[in-house]
Amino acid sequence: MKTAEITVIDYGVGNLLSVSRGLEHCGAKVNMSSDPDFILKAKKVILPGVGAFPNGMRALIELGLDRVIQEVVKNGVPLLGICLGMQLLLDESEEFGLTKGLGVISGKVVPIPNKSVDGEIQKIPHIGWNSLVNSGADWQNSILQEVREGDAAYFVHSFMASPEKSEDRLADALYGGHKISAVIAKGNTTGCQFHPEKSGEVGLKILRNFINL
Amino acid sequence: MTNIRLIARLDVKGENLIKAIHLEGLRVIGSPNEYALKYYQQGADELIYMDCVASLYGRNNILEIVKDAAKNIFIPMTVGGGIRTIEDVTQILRSGADKVAINTGVVSNPKLVTEVAQKFGSQCMVLSIEAKQVSQNHWEVYTDNGREKTGLDVVEWAKKSVANGCGEILLTSVDREGTRQGFDVDLVLAVSSEVNVPVVASGGMGKPDDLLAVVIEGGAAAVAMADILHYKRSNIGEIRDVAEKAGLGVRRYENS
């Protein structure tokens, strides 16, 4: 079998080592790159990221990678955004004022409600293992193939993606009764809010699915 | 409510996993990553590595240990010990850690909390508190593995640090640490009821049942366990079952 090659976009944001180690553990060859030409030739691309939305977006723009990612998506190359990398796929974010995103999936990034549906104050950021629930989509042939409803993944975030179209939602997590987008997808572009590289065997299954897509 | 987290805590000195009592009188247990891998496979939700001698001898050993762990352990890792600057934090995160736990470094420079939170996010900044009881419902912050007094009140210090941007508190009871007498529930409650960030209770877990009081009455969002696991008095699976039977939410985990 040919080794799958994955290009991880290195834009100075986030823990690239963990993502790479996770992918390597699943048998992929990992290239980290911030070179537009290299990324445009990639067969599969991961956009990682932790931290604040405006910083992430600024870093992408400075490296000329915002257009590169939009091009990657247009070319139908499978792209997986993780955590902030998922949020950057949307149109805009309310984190520290309004910042324009990549606009690859329609919708915006909003704060996680600080009260539960019962009106109780809840802790922000949303940190920890939370179960994935199906948002009415078919998980077959997606990165969630063979993941079971109720399987838990590791989340760390204060803002959440709010996709405009319900068909772009693959999985949610419940926090204080609120639905939080856990996995969103449109065409060959997928985003997951949790960290698959930190979600144990379930997370490795998701990375393996992306490698085998 | 979110699932409670079961965290394996690995205190490290040089290349060795060690265990102390009241954070002192270290005993060598074995190789940190052999134990870490075992706890990962048992279904630990997170790992905490604490370098007990980083402030004295530098941090090369712990960085190598964490880098090595990142090859086959895929759960969140927190690293603490001797962190004083934003450069220290950067270096640790680049080694594969997700969060840093800082005690002495932020007592001497409280602004470091804000710096770390602004650069890497508050979720990354874990305030580590070593607490010793001084009177009923009053605890003092200690540094340097429970050796140095600071004069700071634990609850006030926790509140101040949360205001400065810390996203989580690792609260170690020096009095209970290594004693197997159960967690200091009053201490955990005193802090968790005053802050809106998760509190990780550490120190004193002698049997699986001990976690119930500290979570249910103390408001802990997570428990850090060392002695009970290292000496195989229990394991993560058994502890998870105890929590689940008591009605606490835990991560679904099947070893498949």
Image: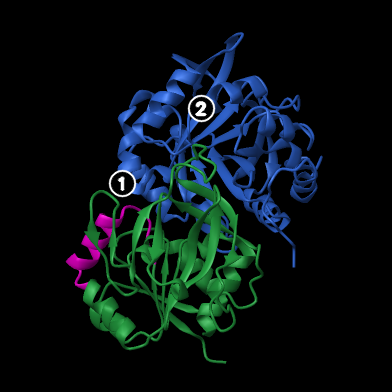
Which secondary structure, mark 1?
helix
Quadrant for residue A198, please give it: bottom right
Q: Are marks 1 and 2 on the same chain?
A: yes
Point out which mark residue B119 bears: 1
- Seen from the viewer's position, the closer of residues B149 and A57 is A57
Whether residue A76 is situated above or below residue A207 in the rendered picture? below
- Image chain in green: A
Residue sitting at x 71%, y 43%:
B248
Residue B20 place in picture, x, y as percent: 66, 30
Whether residue A7 is situated above or below residue B64 in the rendered picture? below
Image quarter where the N terminus of chain A lies is bottom right
Point out which mark residue B246 bears: none
Q: In the rendered image, which residue does mark 2 sit on?
A: B129
- Separation of marks 1 and 2 at Cα, in angstroms: 22 Å
Label 1 marks which chain's residue?
B
A62 part of magenta stretch: yes
Magenta residues, as a range?
Answer: A48-64
Residue B16 place in picture, x, y as percent: 62, 43
| Residue located farthest toward the front when viewing the structure as drawn | A118
Amino acid at dot 2: Ile
Residue A190 place in picture, x, y as percent: 44, 75
